[in-house]
Amino acid sequence: MSEMPLFSINSRELRFSRTMIFAIEEINNSTELLPGVKLGYQIHDSCASVPMAMHAAFHLSNGQDSMFETGDNCSSSGVVMAVVGESGSTPSISMSRILGPFNIPLVSHFATCACLSDKDQYPTFFRTIPSDQFQADALAKLVKHFGWTWIGAVHSASDYGNNGMASFLEVALREGICVEYIESFYRTDPTSKIRRVADAIRRSTAVVVVAFAAAGDMKFLLEELAQNPPPPRQWIGSESWVTDPLLMRFSFCAGAIGVAIQQSVIPGLRDFLLDLSPSEVTASPVLTEFWEDAFNCSLTKSATVKGKLCDGTEDLKSLNNLYTETSKYRITNMVYKAVYAIAHAIHNAVCQEKKSTTQCDKHIRLEPKQIFTELKKINFSQNGYHVSFDAKGDPLAFYELVNWQKTVSGVNELITVGYYDASLPKGQEFHIYKNLTWVEGRVQVMACLIVWKVPVSVCSESCHPGTRKVLQKGKPICCYDCIPCPEGEISNMTDAPDCILCPSEFWPNSVNTACFPKAVEFLSFDEVLGKILEIFSISGACLAIITAVIFFHHRTTPIVRANNSELSFLLLFSLTLCFLCSLTFIGAPSEWSCMLRHTAFGITFVLCISCVLGKVFTKLKEVNFTQNGYHVSFDANGDPVAFYEVVNWQKSESGIIEPITVGYYDASLPKGQEFRINRNLTWLDGGLEVPVSVCSESCPPGTRKVLQKGKPICCYDCIPCPEGEISNMTVFFVLAVLARKLPDNFNEAKMITFSMLIFCAVWITFIPAYVSSPGKFTVAVEIFAILASSFGLILCIFAPKCFIILFKPEKNTKKYLMNKTKM
């Protein structure tokens, strides 16, 4: 079947129909394929119209005429065995629905819609051209191959364009390609609609435009764009229009890239197409119309229409149209393969191999179903090109990558630059072996050579390593911002969705693109600073041990006993460990040393502070001093010594009653001496005699009180004392007097306070010094803080006592301690 317009000859479709005739004649003259069997044919003109194509399908399914001859007589069966065609997908869909119920196979050379692979709807449909599903996959991967993620899309409003673009968008979405706009159109649409599509292309920000359209539709769109050419656009074309020579006249499409059916060589076809005799032309109305249109003359004697008669000197080789374009067979080879596929199916049904010859049964009554069954199984090569069908009736997908390149004369020329083979492993389907020419204005001169620069079509520029992508709100995934990786994280790839955290032993470089091992820098035992800190650390430990030995040796002396010797020894032990644990900070770090050093220091230093706090609490209980004439001290319960004034309400000479201090109560005085009255008191009614208010009279010396049964303790009787109790009371009194003169421990409270001041000063200044110190000096600062605070404690608390013990033994006496002035 050939697709031709109603009012003019489509030269390309005429070439397809003539190729079918050539293939049939070649088969009829073959001694290997269908020997002795002659194939017949009919050619119907669909006029690029679905109703006309359906009419032809009904005509063929009715069994009019025969498809092959046996000998000189036609078969009487009158059944059509198979149909070649149609060129368009939409007419093929309609024809396949009509021919399918009759099991008549339809083998198309140019219907590429992926929908025709559905065997439930089109069980008898085959094709020698790959499905648009493969073409859509090839176009999407082509776009992705060049890094274009922001594109525009236009397509024909037909089964070919709608299904092809749907397949392309499905693959493009998986490849991470975003589409700025999608426009559809058809050749019969009003000019306003086609102009709207052209305006969308002109004002878009996407540089790349993917057009999945038929050549006839694309012609109208490009003509509209030619009136006001858009900014440079990189066109990506489907095989239907990108190989059409008539469309290459649009110069603004220079650099277009697309997929095309593989070029082929068909020996003898060029001569068959171009060597038409006048008798052959006049025998066919179609060829007559073509000849008269091509040479603008008439083959009939009446020249009223064309203006002149053809004189027989006309030569097809001098023409330049789609019929005479025989240098590149693409779709033409698909027609050739379709005819041979049907011939091989018939051959397998009627012929058998016997010894060295092939014999065919000329009288067998064939049914279309037999041809349909054999077509599923064919597997042969013709002119070096393989022919077979998969379960969906599709061939193996193989495309050439073609590029519109301008010649020296400024004319676009179709150049094959690579191929796409769907049978290869994923990621290896593309192979480009020639330089490509890109859209106009995309040229770069380097070292006197012209280098065509690949155009950029992205919504957002790629995020460099060291940054990550953040999607822009309300926009497709191809539109994003690039933000630097957070501290400690890197991204080592372009357009990284997330940053990666460096391992604990690594840190990022300055641009956050790689993790490098952290340099192991430590304070060595062999360097000068390390040796100095070692000396101080060991010296401090020795000093603490020597102090402990001195205290232990003089443990019975008053100065040691008076300073809570148990807490002192525990504090010295803790200080020794503090001095020694600073050594763990020196030397190469390891997992165990890093865990041990801080743990050991924390435990020992907490123990030191606990001992100091214990001394502080002990001193608080022993506080006893006078300030501004007021005495301050605390008892075991933490309460001060009680002291009260004794007041007496007395009348003045004017008759006013006012409180007068007449004495005091001091709880620190011995029992019975707490009260002291130093002025006369005024009693009841202004009298000077002390009133008496007792339940029982006081017992005289030598007697003792015995409580009266059933009455309060103030009511008693006086009975004589037994011998011995008076002497016991005297002993208790003497002990109370001696306890009053215990020493105050050589101003230890002041020394503890001073040591705590040193401690706080060291550790407060440690923080900024530690943070600002680089590398190994942070360790040195930490060791210095440990040693300084430890030396502060041992020198402030123990040095004065050791000095007295060793050099002032005369002060280490009970008498001196008792006589020392209170603080």
Image (cartoon, rainbow, N blue to C red):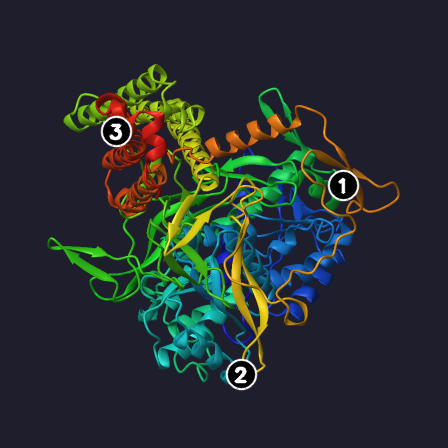
Q: Quadrant of the N terminus?
A: bottom right
Q: Which residue is mark 1?
A: 365
Tag 1–tag 2 contact (CB < 8 Å): no
Compared to 604, does 763 lie above or below?
below
Q: Is residue 567 above or below residue 133?
A: above
- Please tell me which of labels 2 and 3 falls first in the chain: 2
Tell me, yes or no, whether the two marked residues, 2 and 3, touch with CB atoms within 8 Å: no
Picture coordinates of residue 228, whole percent (x, y): 35, 81
Q: Nearer the viewer, residue 547 or 538?
A: 547
Q: Which residue is mark 2?
A: 190
Q: Given the image, on which type of amino acid does mark 3 rest?
A: Phe
> Quick check: 600 left or right of 703?
left
Q: Nearer the viewer, mark 1 or mark 3?
A: 3
Q: CA distance from mark 1 to mark 3?
A: 98 Å
- Which comes sooner in the sequence, label 1 or label 2? 2
Numbered mark located on residue 522 in the image: 3
In the picture as drawn, the residue positioned furthest to the left comes out as 448
Quarter placement of the C terminus: top left
Q: Which of pointers 2 and 3 indicates the residue nearer the eye?
A: 3
**Residue depicted at x 48% and y 49%:** 333
- On the picture, is 568 further left or further right than 449? right
Bin the neighbour count of mark 1 within 10 Å (Cα to Cα): few under 14, some 14-19, many 20 and up: few
Residue 96 can be seen in this image: yes
Q: Work out how far the residue at label 1 is from the one at label 2, CA to CA, in angstroms.
A: 52 Å
The local secondary structure at tag 1 comes to loop
Where residue 683 appears, as percent x and y from the top left, is 64, 66
Name the amino acid type tagged 2: Pro
Q: Residues within 10 Å of mark 3 (few under 14, many from 20)?
A: some
Residue 166: x and y, percent? 58, 60
Q: CA distance from mark 2 to mark 3?
A: 82 Å
